[in-house]
Amino acid sequence: MSELVLEATGLTKSYVMGGRALDVLRGVDLTIQAGESLAIVGSSGAGKSTLLHLLGLLDRPTTGKVLFRGADVGSLSRTARSRLRQKHIGFVFQFYHLIPELNALENVLLPLMMKHSITSWFGAKAKERERGRALLRTLGLSEREGHRPSQLSGGERQRVAIGRALIGDPDVVLCDEPTGNLDEATSREISDLLFQLKQDSGKTFVFVTHDLDLARRADRVVRLVHGRVETFAPAS
Amino acid sequence: MYRLFLALRYLWARPISWVSMVGIWLSVMAFITTISIMSGFLKETRRIIRGTTADIVLTPRHDGVSRSKLSLPSFHEIQSALNDVPGVKGVTPRLVRPALIRVGDSVAPQILGMGQFAENQYVTVIGLDPALERGVTDFDEYLAEQGEYGQAVDSVTQPFWLKKVPAKYVNDDLPVALPGEGAMHFFGLNKGDVVTLVTLPDTLDQDNVKPLTQRFLIGGSVRTGHYQFDMRSLYVPIEAARKFAETKNEATELCVTSAVSDGPGLDATANAVRAKLGESGLSVFTETWVERNRNLLSAVENERSILGFILFFFVAVMSFNVFATLTILVSDKTKDIGILNTLGATPGGVLGIFLGGGLLMSTMAAALGALSGVLLSLNINHVNDGIEKAFGVRIFRADVYTFDRIPIELTPQFVAIAFFGTVVFALLCALLPAVRAARMDPVQALRHE
């Protein structure tokens, strides 16, 4: 039996808006196995992104638990959760979220810089830059490494964002609508790339998506309905 | 590593951060230059006062004595009393007398009719004994040092001696006077000229207001470096001064030289002198040169403190630019803060980016400010000359102040205080926006539009 990477039990998340409580998640139970790809689908406002933020340790649930490799992360400090994220979790967002002041290579290298002190970075800089360049080559961006995000197309920006998520060799990659901002052809390209990378690396991928084509390619699909998870089998 | 890297990139890309840095740079430069000039003023004022006043001055005691009877005990009595006082190097008498001066060898009637211009004819006659002064005061140095308008005496060892007495006065046996360099220039005097001095006797009554006059030969000039002092002083032999003033007083003041001429050492010597003179029953008023000039020294020191205070606030206001710049930066970069959180940046890491930004801005600006402040201070006279040449405006005028060049006192300690003070203050200003960034909720930051 494969190892559980992430596990959510009884997750609820409520917000108070305009003086009224809004229950976004109403008791989510979910397990994610190491090496699997899981798609989470659902209508807008169903709580998909909220669930992803909780799984990615960016937010804390109102009630319930998130376990990472069997350990409850609820009691961890913000700093400890950040360190856990830095080491084990990568994110890909719908709007890429690249740093506009940095070029493609620098954006990709940012997670590696976080692991280094100033002195250790200067020792490892050449090696790490080569690692970043190799990844950009894999992503088909070898000619674009010196380009700023504003000089790249949507598909290229998303490739850079994928590179940034993978460079630190995380256990889990959480993708929030990775094709949501792309045209059909580019969406297909990005989906192909993500599944190719998943297959090559054997990492765990979680997709939050509206894109049923992308969802169909995942090992497992769940649907969020009224803040609860249902198993879902999209029609081919 | 990423903290410094991002801080540099964020600041580099924003013109407002450069504007803030220029503000800090200029304020630190102004702070250092102004305080250096004011410290120079203070130091130079002290040096000149110190040079023109003895370490300790003994004058007749006023209390309970009518002014007309004011007189010092005998010089030799005081000299022998102070012989074994620790710290006392020597004592010399001086007879100081105000007088009117007239260039030429007769007292013209217009002296009394000069009205408001009479003050321009006023000089202070200082009678002294060059042999007793030697090794006790700086009088020999004043003889040796001549400026643009000076005329050297014929003999430093015998300053009141003129080699070539003009034929017209050879038989007159006139005493020699040495005006200050400024007075020499102001009255248009040359060696060999004759001046007539007019003073009043020690005691005046309604029936006897007879002015006393005496002609003196000009034997050269004296330069203390104190502009106003050199404009008004005229040194003569003490015997000639006594004769001129028709006084029975040996001296009007006695100059005591202390082994330590400033600070607690000088105060200790002055106290020892007071005690010894008290024990010996000699009633004399004892003042150090600092006490004698307290008002002037305090005024300059006070001016420096006020300017320092104002400029400190100027630097503080400029440092607040760091606060404004970083507040705007944190607001602009809210989404980036969310992204960095997803990549694993800790709250401390985010704090480091923005605090690092403040540190970079303030360090670079304060370093530039310190460097340019030092360079400007060291070259302030060249700058002054250059401005005069280019625009015809002289910022520093020697005839307004008492110096011929802008004095500078630049200490590494002060430059270090200005530099580190600015950096620390700017860091405190950076702390608030940096803490705000560090405490930002990652999810809210990601959703920021």
Image (tube, coloured by chain):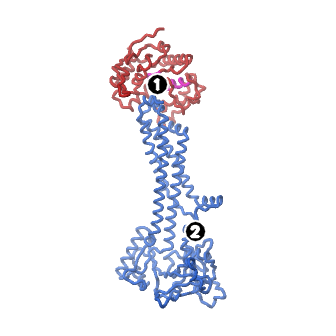
Q: Residue furthest top?
A: A236
Which amino acid does the dot numbered 2 rest on? Answer: Asp
Q: How many marks?
A: 2
| Residue B427, above or below A163 | below
Estimate the x, y position of residue A107 in percent, counting from the top left. Answer: 52, 30
Subunit under mark 2: B
The residue located at (58%, 59%) in the rendering is B380
Image location of residue B306, percent across then percent down: 46, 59
Pick the front one: B387 or A114: B387
Q: Which residue is mark 1?
A: A91
Q: Residues within 10 Å of mark 1 (few under 14, many from 20)?
A: many
x and y percent of residue A176 in the render?
A: 46, 22
Disc number placed over residue B186 in the picture, else none: none
In the picture of the structure, the residue carrying the numbered disc 2 is B399
Q: Name the residue rendered at 46%, 88% in the picture.
A: B205
Q: Residue B294 in the image: x percent, y percent?
A: 44, 69
> Which chain does blue denote in the image?
B
From which residue to which does the magenta span run? A156-176
> Could you say which is closer to the camera, residue B377 or residue B62?
B62
| Relative horizontal placement of residue B447, taking residue B230 as reference (left or right) | left
Q: CA distance from mark 1 to mark 2?
A: 74 Å
For residue A220, above or below residue A128: above
Above/below status of B306 relative to A8: below
**Residue at the outermost right position:** B167
- Residue type, numbered disc 1: Phe
Task: Judge whether residue A175 is colored magenta.
Answer: yes
Query: Chain A takes which shade in the image?
Result: red
